[in-house]
Amino acid sequence: MSGDNPRAYPDRPYVGVGVVVFKDNDVLLAQRGKKPRQNSWSIPGGAQELGETIEEAAHREIHEETGLEIELLDLVEVVNSINRDDDEKVQFHYTLIDFVAEWKSGVIVAGDDAADARWVPLDKIGEYNLRPLTHEVILEADRLRQSGTFKIGNRRQKTV
């Protein structure tokens, strides 16, 4: 029933992390290489691994999908992504934690789950047919970045 995606028809939600990465006035977009939403454009990210903090997952996913190094600035949004099939059964269920970050180093090389990745001027993201919520998250991330006040650096990251 799950087809070619082992996360289809789960018995629990998966935690995913997304990162809105900025370099000057450009934002990093990635084209999904796998289902769900194969070939669509979004912010890069992926699933958290066992024993990994969400911050570690954010750094790893950006590096795996694009080859870039980033500096996390703040948490932007937590999104419930629940997709149902024609019979109303939960086909995919993710809790997505989205961060805002600045590019630190590296040149984009699409890899892992990304079919393509590129820097896009913020005023051109409307040309990439993003989901409305993704578009909103990017704009909110830009507002947070412009404000210059970030919580991540000021909070203790601890695991219990």
Image (spheres, rainbow, N blue to C red):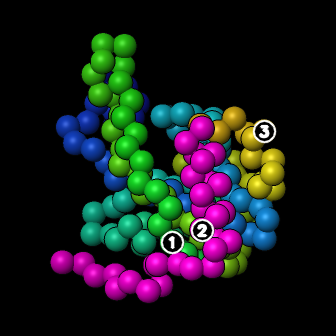
User: In the image, what residue type sits under mark 1?
Assistant: Asp
| Spatial CA span between label 3 and label 2 | 23 Å
**Residue depicted at 31% across the width and 48% down the height:** 14
Numbered circle sitting on residue 61: none
- Which quadrant is the N terminus positioned in? top left
User: In the image, what residue type sits under mark 2?
Assistant: Leu
User: In the image, what residue type sits under mark 3?
Assistant: Glu
The crowd level at tag 3 (other Cα within 10 Å; few <14, some 14-19, many 20+) is: few
* Residue 64 shows in the view: no
Numbered circle sitting on residue 74: 1
Q: Is residue 53 left or right of residue 133?
A: left
User: Where does the image place residue 71, in percent across and percent down from the top left?
Assistant: 58, 78
In reply to whether residue 43 is colored magenta, the answer given is: no
Mark 1 and mark 2 residues within 8 Å of each other at the beta carbon? yes
The crowd level at tag 1 (other Cα within 10 Å; few <14, some 14-19, many 20+) is: many
Between residues 3 and 37, which one lies in front from this camera angle? 37
* Residue 46 shows in the view: yes
Q: Is residue 83 left or right of residue 146?
A: left
Residue to which mark 2 is pinned: 144
What secondary structure is the stretch in magenta mostly built from? Answer: helix
Question: Which mark lies nearer to you, 3 or 2?
Answer: 2
Q: Which residues are magenta?
A: 132-160
User: Where does the image place residue 103, in percent across and percent down from the top left?
Assistant: 67, 73
- The quarter holding residue 110 reads bottom right
1 or 3: tag closer to the N-terminus: 1
Q: Is residue 80 left or right of residue 148?
A: left
Between residues 22 and 141, which one lies in front from this camera angle? 141
Q: Secondary structure at mark 3?
A: helix
Question: Which mark lies nearer to you, 1 or 3?
Answer: 1
Residue to which mark 3 is pinned: 127
- Which quadrant is the C terminus positioned in? bottom left
